[in-house]
Amino acid sequence: MSSSQKQPAPAPRDLSGADAEDLALYREKFLQRLPASLDELHGPSHGVVELPLHMAWSGMTSYDISTPRQRMGLYRTVLHEGLRDDLPLYLNQDLLLQLWPVLRTLVGRTVRTVWEDAFPQLASRTRAAA
């Protein structure tokens, strides 16, 4: 099929072999970036954070953690674009736990699932907030 032909995205249970493989690779990418424990996340809890170009390649590079919208944007960007060594530098365990009930709705399904599967305390924060 040519790339100009449009088909609706397959439902998760209706993935072709190639789509399932792509999804597995995408999931593996995020799994490899996870810290061993949330205790490793010692990033800033206040102030202005400047992200390097490999994470903030499009859009904002500077985030004021005291501003709720910027704080959420920072965490969303780091979760999606940050590498394994970036996560402890830019994410703070307490803030991540506090933000997670809303943040989980702003990140992609794969990111959300990988983090909640690895760290049940995130999923339990969501249930407690509901």
Image (cartoon, rainbow, N blue to C red):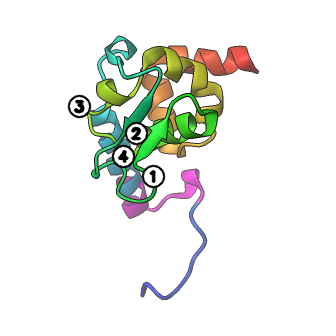
How far apart, in angstroms, are the residues tagged by discs 3 and 1? 20 Å
| Residue 81 marker | 4
Q: Residue at x 62, y 16 (%)?
A: 125
Span shown in magenta: 11-21
Provide residue 76's location: percent of width, then percent of height.
49, 40
Q: Secondary structure at mark 3?
A: loop
- Residue 12 seen anywhere in this rendered image of the structure: yes
Q: Is residue 28 above or below residue 117?
A: below
> Residue at label 1?
60
How far apart, in angstroms, are the residues tagged by discs 4 and 2? 5 Å
> Residue at label 2?
78
Q: Residue at x 54, y 18 (%)?
A: 97
Q: Is residue 12 magenta?
A: yes
> Residue at label 3?
85
Q: Secondary structure at mark 1?
A: loop
**Image quarter in which the N terminus is found:** bottom left
Q: Secondary structure at mark 2?
A: helix
Furthest toward the top, the residue is 39
